[in-house]
Image (spheres, helix red, strand yellow):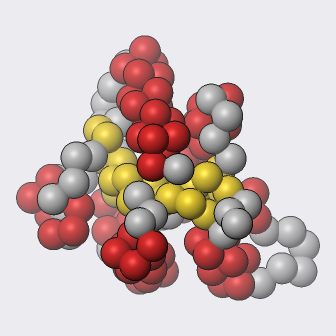
Amino acid sequence: MTTYHVFVSYSHDDADIVADLAGRLERRGIRVAYDKVLVRPGSIIFHEVQEAIRNSAHGPLVFGPASMASGPVTNEYHTLLQRSMYDGRLPIPVLVEDVKTQDLPEFVKIRFYSDLRGVSDAVFDRRVDEIAEAIRRAS
């Protein structure tokens, strides 16, 4: 049984856009986990994140320059990718900031991604609708 529809993997440099993305997904009925909603006083973030990944049906992977250089985020990406291979979870690449598509990991290049780089609020909303629909179809 899953507790969350999605666990969002991202770099803290992208925290504002992730909070916006998570809020919009939640308004569409998608239960979202990411470190800011998981961590409580005294909690061990590594354990909370691992538990959330285990208990999430799918995983948006937010790609920006900082996330591509982050060891912890890379580990989350690999964990989510492994879960997709073994139990059908859907990794959803989401591009933010100045990330160059040619620099994306190979497992992302083979998937259709959601591009939030420099889009208007209306386009952002449409892309969130697309992500939410993909999550519903895969669940």
- Which residue is farthest top? 122
Q: Position of residue 117 (x, y in %)?
A: 30, 37
Which quarter of the image is occupied by the N terminus?
bottom right
Q: Position of residue 35 (x, y in %)?
A: 67, 64
- In the displayed structure, 43 sits above or below 107; it is below
For the point 68% across and 47% down, which residue is it?
31
- In the displayed structure, 8 sits above or below 71; it is above
> Is residue 70 shown to the viewer in this render?
no
Horizontal side of 84 relative to 105 (left or right) equals right
> Is residue 81 shown to the viewer in this render?
yes
Total labels drawn: 0
Residue 47 figure quarter: bottom right
For the point 50% across and 58% down, which residue is it?
58
Horizontal side of 5 relative to 106 (left or right) equals right
- In the displayed structure, 34 sits above or below 106; it is above
Residue 85 figure quarter: bottom left
For the point 59% across and 71% down, which residue is it?
53
Horizontal side of 17 relative to 110 (left or right) equals right
Residue 46 figure quarter: bottom right
- Which residue is farthest right? 41
Q: Position of residue 95 (x, y in %)?
A: 31, 47
Q: Position of residue 54 (x, y in %)?
A: 62, 75
For the point 45% across and 41% down, which residue is it?
137
- Which residue is farthest left? 102
